[in-house]
Amino acid sequence: MYFVVDDAGAVAGRSAGWIAEAIREAVGQTGGCSLALAGGNTPRRCYERLPALPGVPWDRVEFFFGDERAVPQDSPDSNYRMAWETFLSKVPAGAERIHRFEVERADLGTIAREYEALLPAALDVLILGIGPDGHTASLFPHSPALAERERLVVPVTGGEPLVQRLTITPPVIERAARILVLATGSAKAEAVARALEGEEDPAATPAALARNGTWILDRDAAAGLRSPPGPVAGS
Ligand code: 6PG
């Protein structure tokens, strides 16, 4: 399912509301919520809006990351830093419930094994982005990680910046109870169309793994879709 809204600001607002509602629903059902965050730039404006939203049981949320670059946590390329600066530092998210990839502490294989032991059998909420090449998290087209069916987290190298990374694997995406994909800008239009309407080929378009999630797109990112909804969904 996808929603098309006017622009990046509307994507930020609509996505923040979706995340808040997903957390409320998960906590209402089980008393808690495991939330995995996307990195990159697109979620930034969405995350900035989260602290102001009312009635979100932040103190019941376990925070994870869908992927992380192997950079210091204070690096401008750190997904943790972006999430911390935009909202984790502004909501009652106890440090013990924020599960950062501690990439500086050991080799990435060890960190991957330790992190996957923290993950639940199925995430309650998974936030993802999409790259112009169709990647999601740090699952890049034709990566061997796309064939991984046992491990939940693996080290990879790729992306922009071209660095070593840790990423969740396809089973984690397939098992997530609720998935939100955010995309803005014309640079994403072709990849969005492939992911949502093309032949379902995760090897070529890893974001197709999230095809059955909720996608919130601005008009530019939706421009390649065969049948974008008529009137712009609420923005
Ligand atoms: C990362 C992200 C990655 C991101 C896409 C889109 O660590 O790079 O997890 O999957 O979501 O690359 O990035 P932008 O939002 O910056 O376009």
Image (cartoon, rainbow, N blue to C red):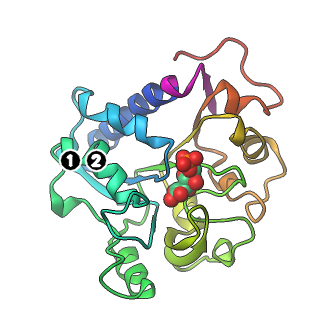
Q: Residue furthest top?
A: 231
Image location of residue 66, percent across then percent down: 46, 60
Residue at 38% x, 81% y: name it.
111
Up-down relation of residue 73 to residue 156 (above or below): above
Secondary element at image label 1: helix
155 to 68, vertically: above or below: below
Image: magenta residue range: 1-10
User: How far across and how far down the image is residue 173, in percent?
Assistant: 55, 59
**Residue 19 percent coordinates (x, y):** 39, 37
Question: Mark 2 packing: few (<14 Cα in 10 Å), some, or many (20+)?
Answer: few
| Callout 2 secondary element | helix
Give percent across and percent down for residue 119: 37, 68
State the residue at coordinates (75%, 65%): 203
Q: Which amino acid, mark 2?
A: Glu
Instruction: Specify the amino acid type for callout 1.
Output: Ser
121 versus 126 height, above or below: below
| Label at residue 66 | none
Is residue 25 found inside the magenta-colored segment of the image?
Answer: no
Q: Which residue is mark 1?
A: 89
Q: Which residue is mark 2?
A: 85
The answer to whether residue 129 is visible is: no
Spatial CA distance of label 2 from label 1 is 6 Å
Does residue 55 appear left or right of residue 169 in this picture? left
* In-front residue for pair 103/36: 103
Residues at discs 2 and 1 in contact (Cβ within 8 Å): yes
- Can you say which quadrant of the picture contains the N terminus? top right
